[in-house]
Amino acid sequence: MKSSFDTFISRYHQRLTDLFAPFETQSRLGLQRQFPKQFMSDVLDCKPLSVFIPESYGGRGGDSAEALSMLEVSSYHSLPLSLMMGINGALFLQPVANYGADSTKTSIFDGVLEHNKMGGLMITEPGFGSDALRMQTSYRGEGASYRVKGIKHWAGLTGEADYWLITARPKNDQGALGRDVSFFVHDAENGGIEVEEVFNNLGLYMLPYGRNQIDISVPESHKLEPKTIGIKMMLDVLHRSRLQFPGMSTGFLGRLVDEAMTHCKERFVGGASLFNYDQVKARLSRLQSYFTASSAMAFFVSRNVPLSMDTSKMDLAANAVKSVSTDYMQSASQHLLQLVGAKGYRLDHIAGRAVVDSRPFQIFEGSNDILYQQITESVIKLMRGAKETNLYRFCVDHPLTSQVAERLRQSLDFEIHPQMAQRKLVSLGQALGRLITMNMTVEMGAKGYASDMIQQTIHVMESEIKQILTGYHQQAVPLLVEETSYASTKGWRSFL
């Protein structure tokens, strides 16, 4: 019988507290590659991944709020652990649950629930990162199975996952690759995946990454079946994953707030508590507002995005949630490191660890620069469909921005030119992403969330949006000297 979620999450939180509590454990885990197997066994015995599995297959039912809460508890203790849970859930278990054959789901979910097995996703290839739709990994039918061949890299859990979800394009008899993308579930025990290199990733030490040579045979039953086309299925997978980033960011940001507040109250400089300095309060206020904004995103997703929902058309919300939450993770890490000072500049200190561990979140699953550009492009497309050219008039009517557009009317009241430069697309996307997040914050406040935290967050985000839009209007054409190098440039001493 399924336990109440409060009991489930409390048990999981206590297990992580016991595992991570000793300072020696924190220090040791922060400096070594991969989690120890017994450590992971102790974590998985709490069945955290059951929140992603339908109740009919022995899971907890796949409730968005439960999934985000599990990720939040995980990231409060360890960001790499939370990412590991997120990879398993959003990038493996949920696609299998939504698109897999019943026989495949039964065997996979049993392996996860009964034997603590884990799964990952392989999309990215050398030379085809952001340009994933041009991937070169291919497949062809061979009787009752598919032959999948190619090279994949930067897949979290390289060499460790028990199952893999692998993307590939169809190859015809002439060797040409089709435009659509298919997903295949592969059991690592069946071989065919050779780890050619394990990367020395800069952060997230506990997660192994590398380059994989793939030559596998997959049964027909292990090919995911899209509702329409494979590209739309891939968008659903990626958007769903981006929408679950607030689970990871909220716990992580909550931990940084706790660490910063404790340090500033206990640290004395010049005979006064660090907590009493104005600049320190400004940094702490931003940290708290980032946490509240991330909580608002989690609140929005939990209310509006069930795990079974097709999110392929939720590009605007998904891209805003992922890019803003991860920008706030990195910004918060920098604030904490500045507050802690020199002792935080260590891999075994949470401040230094947070800086390097949160940085790749702005890169993977869509570089934030690209996502911000796509946010603006999505809005321009919607404005064109509505025959609207004024940004304020559009925002005041759109459900993702309607509750805050009036507050920023003076800043938003301008005409949008669809052919703007790329750098302006990115800048405007940064402002729109924060406007959408601010709207989510207001919605959460209306449900009774702490009003002082809501007002603080609105104040910080309003300031950010105005600052970004000021820069957007003032941007000049970048001056780039193309034919130059350090060796060819006349050095400054020549002019003494």
Image (cartoon, grey):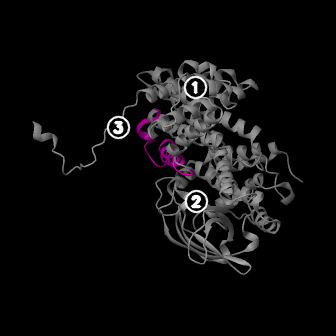
Residue at image position (16%, 43%) is 491
| Magenta span contains residue 349 | yes
Instruction: Decide if residue 122 is in sight here.
Output: yes
Name the magenta segment's main secondary structure: helix
Q: Residue at x 59, y 24 (%)?
A: 392
Q: Residue at x 67, y 45 (%)?
A: 244
Q: Quadrant of the N terminus?
A: bottom right
Give the mark, 1 or 3, whose residue is nearer the N terminus: 1
* Residue behind mark 3: 478
Q: Secondary structure at mark 1?
A: loop
Q: Amino acid at mark 3?
A: Pro
Furthest-right residue in this view: 1
Query: Gap in Å between the C-alphas at discs 2 and 3?
Result: 37 Å
Q: Residues within 10 Å of mark 2 (few under 14, many from 20)?
A: many
Marking on residue 390: 1
Between 65 and 241, the one lying in front of the other is 241
In this rendering, the label closer to the viewer, 2 or 1: 1
For numbered disc 2, what is the local secondary structure? loop
Q: Secondary structure at mark 3?
A: loop
Residue 10 seen by the camera: no
Quarter of the image for residue 110 reads: bottom right
Q: Which quadrant of the structure image shows residue 405?
A: top right
Mark 1 nearby-residue class (10 Å; few <14, some 14–19, many ≥20): some
Above or below, comparing residue 102 to residue 143 in the picture: above
Magenta highlight range: 339-365
- Residue ID for mark 2: 156
